[in-house]
Image (cartoon, grey):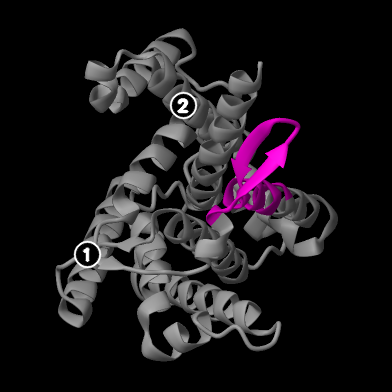
C-alpha cells in the first residue's frame, strides 16, 4: 500500500506539470484556435532567466525572506513580457489567417527563440543549482516524498483554483469564456478582442513560467530544447482531454502523467527506456475510444 501511495504521488506530481503546460496551450486554442508550438520555448526562456547574472545572485542569496519571491517575480515578468511581445508582433498580424497559418507562425517563432538562446548562451547544457534543499524527503505516514513534489501539487492546486475563480467570477474572465464560446458574437457584444487575447497570452506566459521554475528545480539542467518534450506532452494532453476545454486540458495532463508513472512501474527493466512509445500507444487507444477527447466540448467555430 505504501508503494502504491508513492506511485500515486509521483503520478500526480508529473501530471501537474503536464496539466499546467496543457492549460497554457488550451487557453489560446479556445480563443484563437491557435496551437502555440512556441509555448515550450516560453518555458525554456523562463529557465534561462535563472542563469542571468543578476538572477543567479538572487537565487544564491539566503539573506532575508525576499530572495526567492524576487526571483520568481523576475522569471514570471520576463516570460509574460515575451508572450505579450509575441502576441503583438507575430500572432496579432496573423489573427485573421487560417489556423494552419497561425500554427506555422508559432513554429517559426519557436525556431527564432531557440536560435536566439543559442546565440546568447551557446549550445552546451548548463547545470543550475536552485533550491536544491527541496529534494529533501518528507515522511508522510511511512511514505517518503520529496518536498518538491508536495510543492508542485500545492502550486498546481492554487493555480487551478485561482484560474477557475478568475474565469467564473471576474469581468475579464467572463469575457474570455465568451470569446472562447463564440469569438465573433463576443466582439459584437462589446468584448475587446485585443485585450482578451493579450490577457490569454499573459496567463499562458504565467503558466509557462511556473512550469519553468518547477521543472528546473526538479532536473537542475538547462538546454535549448528543454521545453520541447513538455510542449509535446502538453499538446497530447490537450488533444486527449478535448481541444477547446480547459477542464479537458487538466484531465488530459493528469492522464498522461499517470500513464507515464504506471508504465515506468510495471514495464520490465529492458522496456522502460521505451516508456514514451507505450504512452503514445495508449494515447492512440484513448483517441480511438473517444475521438473528441475525454471531456466533450462544443464544436469550435470558425473565428475571424
x, y percentage for residue 293?
51, 22
Magenta stretch bounds? 135-157
Q: Where the N terminus falls, by quadrant?
A: top right
| Residue 112 horizontal/vertical position (percent) | 21, 69
**Image check: 140 left or right of 87?**
right
Task: Tell me if I can see residue 116 in this picture.
Answer: yes
User: Looking at this view, is 114 or 265 the one in front?
Assistant: 265
Q: Residue at x 66, y 47 (%)?
A: 150
**Foreground residue, 86 or 32?**
86
Q: Which residue is mark 2?
A: 261
Q: CA distance from mark 2 to mark 1?
A: 26 Å
- Local SS, label 1: loop
Location of residue 152 with respect to 206 vertically, above or below:
above
- State which tag comes first along the sequence, 2 or 1: 1
59 in magenta:
no
Q: Which residue is mark 1?
A: 125
Residue at (34%, 55%) from the top-left corner?
227
Amino acid at each position: 500500500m505504501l508503494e502504491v501511495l508513492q506511485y500515486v504521488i509521483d503520478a500526480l506530481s508529473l501530471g501537474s506539470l503536464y496539466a499546467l503546460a496543457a492549460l497554457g496551450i488550451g487557453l489560446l486554442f479556445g480563443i484563437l484556435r491557435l496551437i502555440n508550438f512556441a509555448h515550450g520555448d516560453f518555458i525554456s526562456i523562463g529557465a534561462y532567466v535563472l542563469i542571468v547574472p543578476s538572477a543567479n545572485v538572487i537565487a544564491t542569496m539566503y539573506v532575508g525572506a525576499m530572495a526567492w519571491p524576487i526571483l520568481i517575480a523576475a522569471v514570471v515578468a520576463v516570460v509574460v513580457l515575451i508572450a505579450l511581445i509575441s502576441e503583438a508582433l507575430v500572432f496579432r498580424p496573423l489573427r485573421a489567417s487560417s489556423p494552419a497559418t497561425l500554427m506555422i507562425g508559432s513554429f517559426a517563432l519557436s525556431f527564432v527563440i531557440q536560435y536566439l538562446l543559442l546565440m546568447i548562451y551557446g549550445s552546451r547544457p548548463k547545470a543550475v543549482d536552485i533550491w536544491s534543499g527541496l529534494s529533501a524527503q518528507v515522511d508522510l505516514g511511512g511514505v517518503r516524498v520529496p518536498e518538491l513534489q508536495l510543492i508542485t501539487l500545492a502550486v498546481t492546486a492554487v493555480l487551478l483554483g485561482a484560474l477557475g475563480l478568475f474565469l467564473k467570477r471576474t469581468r475579464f474572465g467572463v469575457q474570455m469564456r465568451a470569446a472562447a464560446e463564440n469569438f465573433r458574437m463576443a466582439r459584437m457584444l462589446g468584448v475587446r478582442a485585443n485585450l482578451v487575447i493579450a490577457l490569454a497570452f499573459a496567463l499562458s506566459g504565467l503558466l509557462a513560467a511556473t512550469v519553468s521554475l518547477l521543472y528546473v528545480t526538479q532536473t537542475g539542467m538547462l538546454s535549448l530544447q528543454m521545453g520541447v518534450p513538455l510542449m509535446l506532452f502538453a499538446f497530447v494532453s490537450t488533444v486527449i482531454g478535448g481541444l477547446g476545454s480547459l477542464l479537458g486540458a487538466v484531465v488530459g495532463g493528469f492522464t498522461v502523467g499517470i500513464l507515464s508513472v504506471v508504465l515506468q512501474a510495471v514495464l520490465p527493466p529492458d522496456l522502460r527506456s521505451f516508456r514514451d512509445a507505450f504512452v503514445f500507444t495508449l494515447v492512440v487507444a484513448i483517441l480511438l475510444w473517444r475521438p473528441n477527447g475525454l471531456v466533450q466540448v462544443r464544436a469550435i467555430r470558425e473565428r475571424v
